[in-house]
Each structure stands twice: as C-alpha cells, then as structure tokens.
Image (tube, rainbow, N blue to C red):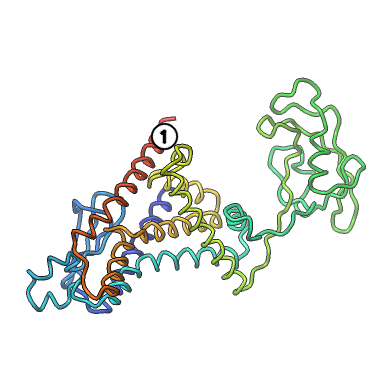
Amino acid sequence: MNWLLTILGIMALIVLHELGHFAVAKAVGMRVERFSLFFPPKLVGIKRGETEYMVGAIPLGGYVKITGMNPEEVESLPPEVARRAYYAQVPWKRIVVILAGPGVNLLIAFVLFWSVLFAGSMNGAITLEGVNPDIQTLKPATTAVGAVERGMPAAGTLRPGDRIVAVDGRPVTVRAAVEAISSHRCAGVAVEGCRGRTPAIVTVRRAGRVVRLSIVPRYNTEARRMLLGFQFAVPVRSFGVLAAAGASAGEMWAMTTQTFSGLAKALTSSKQRSQISSIVGISQVTEQAVAAGPGRALVVIGYVSLVLAVLNLLPFLPLDGGHVLWAVAEKLRGRRVSLTAMWRFSSVGIALLLFLVVSGFSNDIGRLGG
C-alpha cells in the first residue's frame, strides 16, 4: 500500500507540473499537440480536439508538446497553425508558459510545508527542522514523557504525560535523566536485553501527585546504553497562518541552496557523488516517509516537488530554464538566437546532468545489491 501511495504521489507531481505548462499554453492561445505522462513509446492514448493525451512506457517524467517549439519548424507549418506555434509568440508569453510548470511544483512544496507547520504535525516538524536547523519548528524538550514503548521496562509503569522530576533521588533535566538511567550496569555481560543490577528510581509528577516508580532498565546494543523504553515529549511550536508561511519560505530557500551546492560539489567530489539518488532511490525514500506517517510523507513529497522545480530551472535545453534563458536573450537582443547556438551552449550542461543521472542510477543499483 505504501508503494502504491508513493507511486501515485510522484505521478501526481509530474502530472501537475505538466498541467501547469498545458493550462497556461492554452490560456495564451498556443496549440498543444500532446500531454503525456512518462515518455514514449506510447502505451495508451486518446485524442480530444487537437490534443492527444497519452501514457508512455518509460517512467522518467512527462511532457507537453506545443506546436513549434523548434524555431525551424514554424516556417513549414500552415499559416493558421503557425500563428499559434510556440516560437510565433512574443517572449513574455513563452516565458510564462515555461515557468508555469516549475511554478506549480514550487506552490505544491510551499502548500505542503505550510500545512504541516500549521497543523502542528510532530513528524513533519522534526523532518523540517532536520533539514534546516536555523528554523525552529520544535520547542525545547521538556522532561514530560511523550511515548512509552511496548515490551520495554517502562511499559505499564510510566505513562504519557508523566513529568519526570528526579532519577535515583536527583532532580533532572532531559540530559541528566538520560545520563542517570545510562549509568546503571547490567547484572552480567552487556548484551542485548540484559537487565540492570539495580532498578532506576524514577520520580514523576502525575495528575498533580508525586509518584515514585522502580523500573529495572535493559541494555540496548544499538543505543549502547541502558534504556527504560520511553521518549520525552518534544512539543511542536504553534504556527499561525503567517508564521507558517514565513517558515515554509525559509525551508524552501534552505533546501534550494542545499540542492544547488550539492550538485556543484557532486561534480568534483566522489564522496558527495555517492550520495546522489535517481528516481529509484527517491521512490525508496518517499516510500519510507509514507510508512513513517503523513507528516513526514508530506514533507518528503514537498521536497521532491521542490527539487523537480529547481532542476527544471537549470538554464540548459531541453529543460524549462533553457527555454526561459533564450526567450530572455531574444528580448534583450531584439532578435532570435540561432538553434545551433542554443544547443551548443546547452550541450555542456546536459552532459554534466547526464553524468549525475548515471551516477544516481549506479548508486541506487549498488544500494539495492547490498
């Protein structure tokens, strides 16, 4: 079920991106020949009016085919078709059509981040603060118990909402409580699940009363310390409409700069390059986020949407940023740039991007193969 939701989420991002191009192209009078989810060869398709709607066999994206996106094509078109071709339009119309796709993805990311913060989602807030610690989505931790793990020593003894005031007779902060519990030693060799020699005496304030509890900790090899099996509550900050909007914009800026700096470093650093993922790895991360809960899932899907927008805005054809670059250049020069010059400039960038894509697939194959 999680994988199905993941695939549907990624497909929705692609469809909405292309729908942005499609809707604005239609609005400014351009002729749209095809709206496709995924790339050819075609699996299924249906034609409505002048536009064919299809699903391709290669799940690496999608596209909208607007008549005359090759400037040399316009001259060979019938006059009634040529006047609605992409390169027959003034530069501003071409720019708004191209920016509509990434714009939709930026809007999706903003709305998802805003929703998570405004709703006060714990998983979502933790994920956002992990990406950008400069934006505080969480309040300072308190000694209140947030959750108790099943099958652990604290189960049935500690309760969510208990406020720990002392451990082994000493007043504690969160850090001091962890250290006090960790100071207990196993009755024998420190192996997974071994019981402590002595119980931890935990004093809590519960419903206005002070209660003393005796709980024997167990050793956890992953944490490398003794545990009772509970988590401290980490309250989420309360975000109003405007505060959530400001924090979401800050998160998007941080993620964008991290994406660009990561791509730049990946070209020169093998260590950074080994962390790149393809659509396979992205799908795995998204599936894990979906399994972790709706808050984290929304943040990860928002991040994927943001990256989709950022990568599409790189100034190389056939990416959206390449079309915007040459439309702006035409406006500034007062005349069209030759197709040869466009592709000569773009070839270097596309080669670098293909290098990163191949690296991403190689990394994912290596991870899947162990």
Label 1 amino acid? Leu
Q: Which of the 4 image quadrants contains residue 98?
A: bottom left
Number of numbered discs on residues: 1
Residue that carries the numbered disc 1 in the rendered image: 368
Q: Which of the 4 image quadrants contains residue 26?
A: bottom left
Q: Is residue 176 above or below residue 83?
A: above
Give me the residue at 63% from left, 72% from top: 240
Query: From the image, which quarter does the C terminus lie in?
Result: top left
Q: Is residue 288 above or below residue 153?
A: below
Which of the two residues, 306 or 9, is positioned nearer the viewer here? 306
Residue situated furthest top in the rendering: 189
Give me the residue at 33% from left, 69% from top: 20
Give me the residue at 87% from left, 50% from top: 165
Residue 237 screen position, x and y as percent? 68, 63
Q: Is residue 29 above or below residue 280?
A: below
Residue 161 screen position, x and y as percent? 77, 55
Residue 314 screen position, x and y as percent? 36, 58
Q: Is residue 281 above or below residue 314?
A: above
Which of the two residues, 369 or 346, is positioned nearer the viewer here? 346
Q: Secondary structure at mark 1?
A: helix
Q: Residues within 10 Å of mark 1 (few under 14, many from 20)?
A: few
Give me the residue at 24% from left, 78% from top: 90
